[in-house]
Amino acid sequence: MKRLWLVVLLVLLPVHVHALTAVELMEQSQAAFLYPGQDFRVRIHMRLIAPGGQERVREMVMLRRNEGPPGGDQKYFIAFQRPADVKDMTLMVHKYPAQDDDRWLFVPAINMVRRIAAQDKRSSFVGSDFTYEDVSGRDVASDTHTLLGEEKVGEADCHKVKSTPNAGDVDYADRISWIDKRTFLPLKEEYYDLKGAVIRVFAAERVEVVAGIPTVVRRSMRNLQTGHRTEVEFSQVAYGIGIEDSLFSERFLRQPPRKWLD
């Protein structure tokens, strides 16, 4: 009988569930968005849309391998396949926490591997509204994070977090993220200038579960200053396929292995 009363008492006691801090939310979001699976392969169809409606297309295959737990080192390899002016161009990124990433670009027209300077991380990624840093992600520790509350995006309940860069290494003053409470994926991001005006908007437009992992398979970035926007579709998504570490070397920038790209 005493044991029964003890159980009842424990049930009635108030339960204090640890509420995640803003930093913990951003770490969970980064893990869900950029680090799922030991490795990852995807075919990407990118549409670059000018304010007047003119379109350009970029098609590529992206490979990613984690070198440790979420938040740790990563390696990216991107092979461009269409159109002709970027065909056979390749990009490799070695991403490190707490220090500048290394980026190399192979340009077949001049048969040269060019190292991308760290300060170019905010440059446009192949003419799109995404930056090189957007592709591989920004270190959580590079910003100060503040929890603003909760808000819905569509039907999804989200945490709302403001991230302010610790250094003047970016072209925006603040970023506000809406993080899905269920999946921790960022469903929306707004980038603000020093005057508090929204200058770019990211949207996760479709999420599918692939191999048990919620994955953003359609996303967009709009530049509100220029009216330009970029729409991205993922297909042939695969996790845990055994991508070798040796692939992420300068040698394969010139001759990417076909087995991962076809």
Image: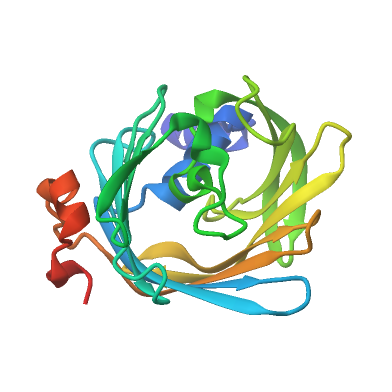
Name which residue lies at 13% across and 71% down. Answer: 259
Residue 194 occupies quadrant: top right
Asked whether the viewer can see residue 185, the reply is: yes
Location of the C terminus by quadrant is bottom left
The colour mode here is rainbow
Residue 225 in the image: state x and y as whole percent: 81, 53
Q: Is residue 78 left or right of residue 247?
A: right
Name which residue lies at 43% across and 46% down. Answer: 136
Name which residue lies at 39% across and 76% down. Answer: 84
Residue 5 in the image: state x and y as whole percent: 52, 33
Residue 31 occupies quadrant: top left
Measured along the vertical axis of the image, is residue 77 above or below residue 54? above
Q: Is residue 118 left or right of residue 152?
A: left
Asked whether the viewer can see residue 5, the reply is: no
Q: Is residue 126 left or right of residue 55?
A: left
Location of the N terminus by quadrant is top left
Name which residue lies at 45% across and 63% down. Answer: 214
Q: Is residue 136 left or right of residue 167?
A: left
Residue 133 in the image: state x and y as whole percent: 50, 42
Measured along the vertical axis of the image, is residue 80 above or below residue 101? below
Measured along the vertical axis of the image, is residue 257 above or below residue 113? below
